Structure formats: structure tokens, C-alpha cells
Amino acid sequence: MARTTDSDLAPQELRVLVAVADTGGFSPAAQALGLTQSAVSHSVRGSERKIGAVLFDRGRRGARPTGAGEKAVAHARRILRLLELLTAEARAGSRSPEAEGSLRIAAFRSAALHLLPPVLDRLRARHPGIEPRVRIVREVGRGTAGEVADGRADIALATLGGSAPLPPGLVASELFEEPYALVHARGHAAPRSLPLVDWAENCGSYTRDWWAAQDWIPAASVEAEDDGAVLSLVSGGHGMAIMPALSLVGAPESVGVADLGPRRPTRQVGYVTTSELAGSAVVRAMVRELRASVPQVMSRLEPGA
């Protein structure tokens, strides 16, 4: 039988690391865990000694993870989640083969609006023992995949195919490809002459080459925080935009949609999870319902749907 060593971190030590990172200090972490501040401080020092690195920068304003600390906390979250699933699946297996327990989902806004609802409907109908918890995250920087890498989500709806590789330990699978289209106030005679309305999530590495080759696209005159704001501005005649199909589901009648031609940009939408969680009952159930819901979603992405 394998035995622990003095360098192994115990689950409670992992919980302390996560609590300090989440609360931003030793005192609030102690309060959250029901411990004394000295116990939390002692635990962190012990973890740092075992790992051989400083995990938190201490200061008057609290404690912030160092580079090593960010990696340690991400691993701690993922390990604690696996321990939680081990217990939940073992207990469930002794009673019923049905998947049950919490399922943490990260999604970007348009996926949360138009892809996730039918999936959650199917999931709740077929797996009433699963408790979905959804976190909506902007798809910029590390985006939804970063939530999985950091141990905050079990599975993420994400845009795939960018130039940056997935973080180590993550796996991804494509669900569908969605096209971009030109949107403008309905009835405008020359929509390409309008100023551009854009938002940070709109143009990733998958569209950047196409975008750079289009000399008719001006610099953005308006930069909105999300695609809903873009549609509102476009609907009011304040500019045109180039948007992915998911963002256009349910667009108001005042918005016109024009095809960008056979070489139009597209983006891949899929899911991301960890190699360990991919085999868990709750994630496998979610993936099945995602794939079963794709035809329904794709029908809504067709022009005029």
C-alpha cells in the first residue's frame, strides 16, 4: 500500500490554500474555515515548506498568490473536486447507477443564452440528481477554459481553435461551427458604409486573419461590453457589426443580417474539461446532453430561423 510522505499535502492544507486565495487574506480565510488565523498561517507555512516555494505575498492589504501560488491553488481546487466526486460517485454507485451531485459549468454569454438552456432542460429531465451550477464568464484572455484550468468549473462551453494552446491537463471537443454575419439596421441602403460597433469578445485569433484582410472594415467607433449592447446600438442605426451566429439568435426585427460570402469567418464552439473529470458521471452526462441538443441549436443558427 502506498504511504504518504512528509512532503504530501493533506486535503485540509489544500482547503486552506484555496480559502486564502479566494478570500484574499489569512484572517478572512480563517473565518471562512472556522479556524484561527494562527492555524491558517501555520498551515500555509507548512505547505510552502513542503512545496519549496513561497505561495503568497503577504502585505497590509492581505495575501495574494505568487506565480507558484496560483499554480498550487489551481491544482488544489482540482484535487479537492476529484476527492468530492470520488465520495459522491462511490455513494451513488452503491444506491443507483444514475449520475448525481453538483456540476459546475462555465459558459460565455451567447452560449449561456442560446445553447445552455435546452441542455439544462434535458439534463434535469434525464438526471434529476445532478445539480448544475452555472458561471457566466467573458470569453477574453483565458476565458471559460481558464475557469476549468483553475479548478472553478468542471466543464466549460468555450470557443476553440485559437492560437493559444489549451492549458496542460485540459481536453476539448468541438460541438459545432458557427458563421459570422454582417448586421445593420434593417433597410439601410449601404450597411458597409456605417461605422463599426464592436466588443472585446468578438474577434479572437480564429477571425483575426480574415478581419485584417478586409480593407472595408473601419476601426471601431464604439466598443461595447457585450454582444447585447452591440445589437442594441446596431438596431438603433448607430453602426454595423460583424457578429457570430449565436449572438444573433432572437435578434430584433429591426436588425438586418447579411451573409459575408463563402469565405466568411467562422468560429468553433465546443466544450473543455480536464482529463480526470472527463470520465466522471456528471461530466459524461453533460456531454451527452450537449451533443443531443446540437441539432436543435444548429436549426436556430440558420438564416431566418
Image (tube, rainbow, N blue to C red):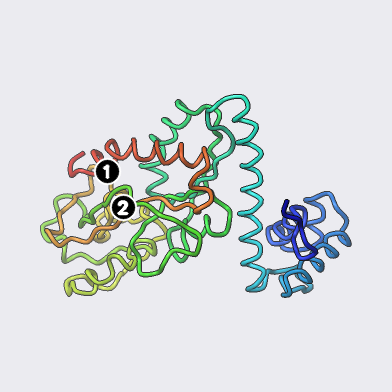
Q: Position of residue 165 (x, y in %)?
A: 41, 67
* As drawn, 289 above or below 72: above
Q: Amino acid at mark 2?
A: Leu
Q: Nearer the viewer, residue 279 or 66?
A: 279
Packing grade of label 1 (10 A; few <14, some 14-19, many >=20) is few
| Residue name at image x 17 percent, y 71 percent | 216
Q: Nearer the viewer, residue 110 or 37?
A: 37
| Residue name at image x 78 percent, y 57 percent | 28
State left or right for residue 177 relative to residue 119: left
| Res. 137 visible in picture | yes
Tell which circle, 1 or 2, labels the residue nearer the N-terminal end: 2
* As drawn, 87 above or below 180: above
Q: Which mark is residue 252?
A: 1
| Residue name at image x 50 percent, y 44 percent | 279
Q: Position of residue 198 (x, y in %)?
A: 32, 63
Residue 204 placement: quadrant: bottom left
Rounded to the nearest angstrom, the CA distance separating label 1 from label 2 is 8 Å
Q: Nearer the viewer, residue 277 or 182?
A: 277
Q: Position of residue 200 (x, y in %)?
A: 39, 64
Tag 1 and tag 2, C-beta contact below 8 Å: yes
| Residue name at image x 66 percent, y 58 percent | 76
State left or right for residue 280 relative to residue 30: left
Q: Which mark is residue 231?
A: 2
Callout 1: SS: loop
Q: Position of residue 295 (x, y in %)?
A: 27, 37
Q: Residue furthest front?
A: 1
Callout 2: SS: helix
State left or right for residue 236 relative to residue 8: left
The quadrant the C terminus occupies is: top left
Q: Amino acid at mark 1?
A: Pro
